[in-house]
């Protein structure tokens, strides 16, 4: 198939890519990692990584996608370097693992939607979260989330839902802004802001070593990088598009939503007397449920909020599921609908341990994000920086007036900065992961 459809409108591509990027990563994962990793120092390292590594790698995926007009597996063949398919394969494995537990967290969100509309989150927000997060109910709602994603993809009504997301994502933003404003009036706000926004610069270099794996993993996760998703989306865009501008819009939007989520979570946690790291994976749920309970009309507001979060989670989930399914349908000659349903069943089973015990959720999450996505990003940057540089630079120059300066900076970053940072990160991540496994399972 040489003639490929291109996105009908500029906004279509941006919305799909932003729909993938904005999801549980911004609202659930970012604040809890920040809370576990020391607040403002984590924020600084994370922001540096988004700009210095995330943006160049996002452009790598855009360039590979548009240049090849292919999915991530076919792309490297098409570009004449079939051996680099391995990079795509690492990403596909990461997508598989991530999706298996993304669906579990999606199931928590459904439970919070239901709870909001049917009588609340119980007296103790922490206890309510723990009962939501693991057990047979967590497995059942994981199944429901999985079935919803597979059903929508199999029925081919994804477009309809993505249209809904164009309303939902702005709604999430408005709600977050409102909640952050309310958070600013709470007693704990001052302490929360200094924890979240005022880094201790004297220790930040030393802290960076312990922060790097989580911050880099989050930068990849939140921008949907390292799995070939952005390669796939960019394979449909025309040569008249300015990739740099599109990347800018997506990164700014994604980062802004994560920052806002932090501005909501920390004042709420501090006001409820919960230590920022203590909430763990439950931070957003505990802090919001606690706050919604206090507010007049809070449960209705909570219902709306969690419903919007669910839609944001679904649009991200489609993009991951798609990679897994197209990997199978492209590699083996099988049909789409049975593959989608079969994969959903397999992924459901694979995700079950994470619905029983949060330690397994960590084990999946750390392995996929801090190791596999980083490895995939490392391979991609070496490929473009050292193997495919000339063509890549030409591709990035299309669709805009260019004097080659930005391309030169991009290339230097990809040759030196990104590989060095990611190689160090990978070594630290592997070391930390072994430590984590020993501590948790031995
Ligand atoms: N970026 C999405 C989010 O922030 C999650 C995601 C991860 C989507 C991996 C695709 C791939 O929720």
Image (cartoon, helix red, strand yellow):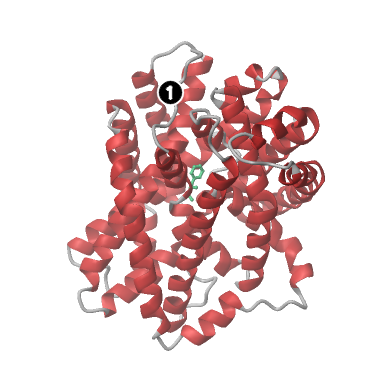
Q: Is residue 419 left or right of residue 401?
A: right
Instruction: Indicate whether 125 appears above or below 391.
Output: below
Residues 79 and 299: in front is: 79
| Residue 83, picture quadrant | top right
Residues 191 and 66: in front is: 66
The residue that appears at 24% across and 73% down in the rendered structure is 298
Q: Is residue 128 left or right of residue 101?
A: left
> Percent from the top left, x then y, of residue 201?
74, 76
| Residue 344, picture quadrant | top left
Callout 1 environment at 10 Å: few (<14), some (14 to 19), or many (20+)?
few
> Percent from the top left, x then y, of residue 441?
61, 51
Element under disc 1: loop
Instruction: Indicate whether 275 appears above or below 157.
Output: below
> Percent from the top left, x then y, of residue 434?
70, 49
**Mark 1 highlights which residue?**
5
Single out the residue that lies furthest toward the bottom: 187
Q: How many marks on residues?
A: 1
Residues 339 and 16: in front is: 16
Residue 435 in view in this figure: yes
Residue 120 in view in this figure: no
The residue that appears at 57% across and 75% down in the rendered structure is 196
Residues 290 and 191: in front is: 191
């Amino acid at each position: 198939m040489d003639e490929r459809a291109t996105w009908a409108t500029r906004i279509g591509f941006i919305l799909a890519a932003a729909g993938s990027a904005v999801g549980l990563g911004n609202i659930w994962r970012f604040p809890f990692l920040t809370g576990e990793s020391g607040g403002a120092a984590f924020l600084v390292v994370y922001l540096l990584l988004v700009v210095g590594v995330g943006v160049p790698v996002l452009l790598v995926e855009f360039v590979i996608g548009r240049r090849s007009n292919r999915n991530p597996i076919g792309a490297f063949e098409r570009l004449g370097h079939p051996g680099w398919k391995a990079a795509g394969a690492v990403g596909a494995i990461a997508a598989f693992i991530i999706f298996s537990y993304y669906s579990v967290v999606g199931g928590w969100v459904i439970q919070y939607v239901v709870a909001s509309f049917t009588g609340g989150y119980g007296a103790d927000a922490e206890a309510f979260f723990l009962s939501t997060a693991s057990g047979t109910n967590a497995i059942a709602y994981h199944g429901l989330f999985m079935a919803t994603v597979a059903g929508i993809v199999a029925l081919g009504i994804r477009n309809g839902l993505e249209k809904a997301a164009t309303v939902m994502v702005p709604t999430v933003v408005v709600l977050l802004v409102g909640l952050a404003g309310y958070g600013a009036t709470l007693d704990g706000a001052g302490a929360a802001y200094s924890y979240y926004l005022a880094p201790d610069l004297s220790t930040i270099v030393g802290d960076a070593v312990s922060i790097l794996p989580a911050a880099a993993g989050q930068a990849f996760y939140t921008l949907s990088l390292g799995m070939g998703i952005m390669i796939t989306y960019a394979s449909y865009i025309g040569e008249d598009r300015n990739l740099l501008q599109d990347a800018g819009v997506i990164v700014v939007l994604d980062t802004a939503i994560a920052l806002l989520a932090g501005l909501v979570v920390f004042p709420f946690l501090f006001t409820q007397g919960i230590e920022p790291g203590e909430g763990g994976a439950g931070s957003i749920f505990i802090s919001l449920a606690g706050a919604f309970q206090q507010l007049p009309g809070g449960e209705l507001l909570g219902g709306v909020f969690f419903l919007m979060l669910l839609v944001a989670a679904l649009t991200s989930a489609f993009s991951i599921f798609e990679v897994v399914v197209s990997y199978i349908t492209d590699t083996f000659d099988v049909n789409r609908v049975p593959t989608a349903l079969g994969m959903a069943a397999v992924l459901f089973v694979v995700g079950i341990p994470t619905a029983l015990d949060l330690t397994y959720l960590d084990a999946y999450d750390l392995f996929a994000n801090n190791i596999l996505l980083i490895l995939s990003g490392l391979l991609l940057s070496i490929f473009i920086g050292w193997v495919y540089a000339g063509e890549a630079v030409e591709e990035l120059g299309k669709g805009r007036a260019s004097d080659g300066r930005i391309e030169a900076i991009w290339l230097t970053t990809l040759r030196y900065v990104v590989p060095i940072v990611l190689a160090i990160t990978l070594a630290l991540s592997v070391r930390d992961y072994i430590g984590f496994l020993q501590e948790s399972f031995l």
